[in-house]
Image (cartoon, rainbow, N blue to C red):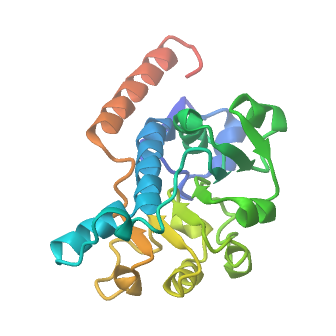
Amino acid sequence: PGLRGTLNVEGNFYQNLDYPYCFRKGIHVLNCGSAYALPVAEMALGMALDLARGISREDRRFRAGREGFLSESCRDSVLLSGAEVGIIGFGNLGKALAKLLQPFRCSLRIYDPWLPESVLREYGGTAISLEELLEKSRFIFVMAGVTQENQGFLGRSLLERIRKDAFFLLMSRAAVVDFDALCDLTEAGRFNAATDVFPEEPLPKDHRARKNEHLLLSAHRAGGIPQAYTAIGDMVLDDLRLLLQGLPP
């Protein structure tokens, strides 16, 4: 009866808590996800630049003695500056990324059915349907969290709409994407992609994604940096102080 709040320091709304009960009883469910927003956004920006300029790919070729100097290895390089960018999901992660993209003067399109267009305009974005975003964007950032309703919403038929010269970056949760379809399409060279998350972690050693030259891989390391954990500690202490003073967290 005296429970005031539940503090979730995982950054996810996993189905390990009876959320409807908490809401009915006025129990605060506190989440630290915002602490990961900027670290994930910076990682997304870095991976986008890597895909656009072949940074890690050319590093591997150089070490193997297969490098091409000057324009020889730059024929498929593109600028992020001024590019058509789509962001799927505009919560903490999407907003943090939009701020980082401002100096690049991108044409920003956003799909988030939960937010009014006025919020998107504040960040320089334009609301767009999911289908149009996939078809028109050169860089596609998936920043949407996973819920009971949206698991796998980026299925094969939608992924097939992605333009052939696009870069697709999965930065939030693997469960929002048909990962097998993503592997199929990138293996076939339909588009290049990057992912920081996987349907099974650790990823099996024999998983085909490890051999996919069109897929940039990161072992779920975008958000969990030491500065983020320090920020989470600060958030927890701040909320506890407020609750002890009888104030809302």
Horizontal arrangement in the rendering, residue 208 relative to residue 95 (left or right): left
Give the residue at x 47% y 62%: 77
Give the residue at x 71% y 34%: 124
Give the residue at x 62% y 54%: 144
Give the residue at x 49% y 85%: 187
Tell me residue 145's x, y (percent).
60, 54
Tell me residue 177's x, y (percent).
60, 71
Q: Quadrant of residue 215?
A: bottom left
Q: Check the picture and name the quadrant holding the C terminus.
A: top right
Name the one closer to the observer, 12 or 218. Answer: 218
Horizontal arrangement in the rendering, residue 14 relative to residue 88 (left or right): left
Note whether residue 226 is visible: yes
Against 89, residue 204 (above or below) is: below
Q: Quadrant of residue 122?
A: top right
Q: Check the picture and name the quadrant holding the N terminus.
A: top right
Name the one closer to the observer, 73 or 225. Answer: 73
Horizontal arrangement in the rendering, residue 48 relative to residue 114 (left or right): left
Against 187, residue 166 (above or below) is: above
